[in-house]
Image: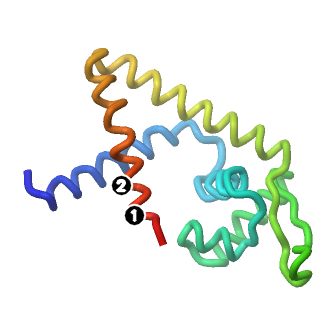
Amino acid sequence: MDDDALAEDLRQVIGELVRAVRVVDTMPSGESAILGHLDRDGPRTTADLARLRRVTHQAAAKSVKELLCDGLVRAEPDSRDGRKLLLHITDVGRAHLQRERAQRAARLNAAITDTLRPEEQQLLRDCVPLLARLTSRMTEP
């Protein structure tokens, strides 16, 4: 298999895997991604979130509006620049995100356990750091 074929096969399989895991999600992926960023990185503006997600400001704003309405995030004026609003994940939002993550992990774990032999599970464990390095390389500024 040449390098281009490897890259395309990996892209396709990882995309399908992510979609299969997200079948259990109870919220749109954009909203879930925003909660994830706020949980991992702390308060952000809508513009920051749009940049991080590589979407338009309007797309991020639509997701933020839904999250605000559902009480999963809250907005406060930025202490450094009062014209901006910083978005914070709420306790309710964090709990919701944890449930989503647990459902995804349970679905993936069940598939791993049901499908792969123990030695294949170890091979998969060994691949995780490689995939993390690839992701890091592709997301660095």
Relative to 11, 92 lies left or right: right
Q: Secondary structure at mark 1?
A: helix
Q: Which residue is mark 2?
A: 134
Q: Along the line of sight, which residue is nearer the eye, 37 or 28? A: 37
Picture coordinates of residue 103, whole percent (x, y)? 59, 31
Picture coordinates of residue 26, whole percent (x, y)? 65, 42
Q: In the image, what residue occupies the spot 52% across and 42% down?
A: 22
Q: Are marks 2 and 1 in contact (CB under 8 Å)?
A: yes
Give, as a three-letter code, the residue at label 2: Leu
User: Does residue 99 lie above or below 51 as drawn?
Assistant: above
Residue 114 quadrant: top left
Relative to 87, 32 lies left or right: left
How many C-alpha atoms fall within 10 Å of the one at disc 2: few (<14), some, or many (≥20)?
few
C-alpha gap between disc 2 and disc 1: 6 Å
Picture coordinates of residue 81, whole percent (x, y)? 87, 82
Q: Which residue is mark 1?
A: 138
Q: Along the line of sight, which residue is nearer the eye, 111 or 79? A: 79
